Image (cartoon, helix red, strand yellow):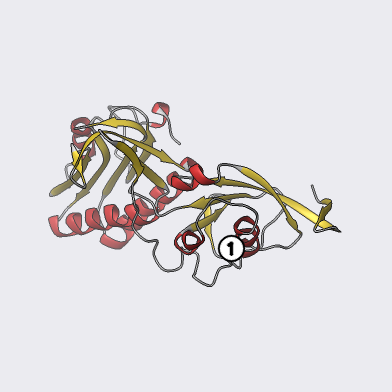
Amino acid sequence: MLRLSPIGGILFKAMQVQVLSYGILKDWLGATSVDLPEGATVARLIQHLASNGSRIPANTWGSIAVSVNAEYAQPTHVLRDGDEVGLLPPVSGGSGSPMNAPDPQPVSNPPTRVYLTHESIEADNLVYTAKHGEDGAVVVFDGIVRNNSRGRQTLHLDYESYEEMALKQMNELASQAIDRFHVRHVTLVHRLGRLHVGETSVLIIVASAHRAQAYEASRFLIDTLKKTVPIWKKETFIDGAIWSDGEPFPEGIAITPEAPRAS
């Protein structure tokens, strides 16, 4: 609801937005509600957060992305009362819940099968049910948790996600792969929660009449997922835990260096 709100001793027509932060940004900021002047932009919100005691380092603002109502947004995007704004650090590779998983023996073979799950990913069964008589190739990418990273022994990983937005992005990627590479089927599954060594974190299955298109589509899916789908990874080692450094957002998604920062 629009209302009069005092900011800096001046009354003006204001709106309120809900700010959600993820990954390492959640450790610094958490979730909060912010009052802004009606018609304020994403850049104005960033400026407000950066100049009002935020623990987020000033040089971090230029590397994050911002979403508005689960869609990527640029600094010039005009906010509305009640908007949900996500502050997204670079993602670390890829909600659902177990009920989002497809039936193990689906009646049909749809062009895409996309979901997130907190349960173990049954790779063999998903590969079997992705195959169809017209396919000449099935390419599988099975990303698993390894026992070391950066020369340190890994105990486990924790994946968290902006789930509503992640599912939208994953479905868009699967559809793009089919349209761009002319493959018949894409399965795209990502695990959330705590994973131990040897468990599957992300599974990509591409079925196609020809192997070249299947390979290309699979590479496109994993490379793009790791840059654009809002999923973050926290690594726990025998001597501590850190949020994994993500790959930089592609041009057009990351907040530009010109975005306001703390003084």
Is residue 145 visible in the rendered image? The answer is: yes
Q: Position of residue 35 (x, y in %)?
A: 73, 51
Whole-percent x, y for residue 227 in the image? 35, 56
The residue nearer to you, when weighing 182 against 10, is 10
Q: Is residue 77 above or below residue 201?
A: below
Camera-nearest residue between 71 and 30: 30
The image shows residue 5 at horizontal and vertical percentages of 83, 52
Task: Give how far across and how far down residue 27 sits, in percent.
Answer: 49, 42
Residue, x 42% and y 51% (percent of image)? Answer: 169
Q: Amino acid at mark 1?
A: Ala
In this view, 27 is above or below 96: below
- The total of numbered circles placed on residues is 1
Residue 234 visible to an observer of this rendering: no
Q: Quadrant of residue 78?
A: bottom right
- 32 horizontally vs 165: left or right: right
Dot 1: element: loop
Label 1 environment density (alpha carbons within 10 Å; few <14, some 14–19, many ≥20): some
Q: Quadrant of residue 219?
A: bottom left
The residue indicated by pointer 1 is 262
Q: Which quarter shows the C terminus?
A: bottom right
Q: Classify residue 230 as left or right of residue 51.
A: left
Q: Nearer the viewer, residue 84 or 109?
A: 84
Above-or-below relation of 133 to 64: above
Residue 111 lies left or right of residue 253; in this view the side is left
Quarter of image, res 99: top left
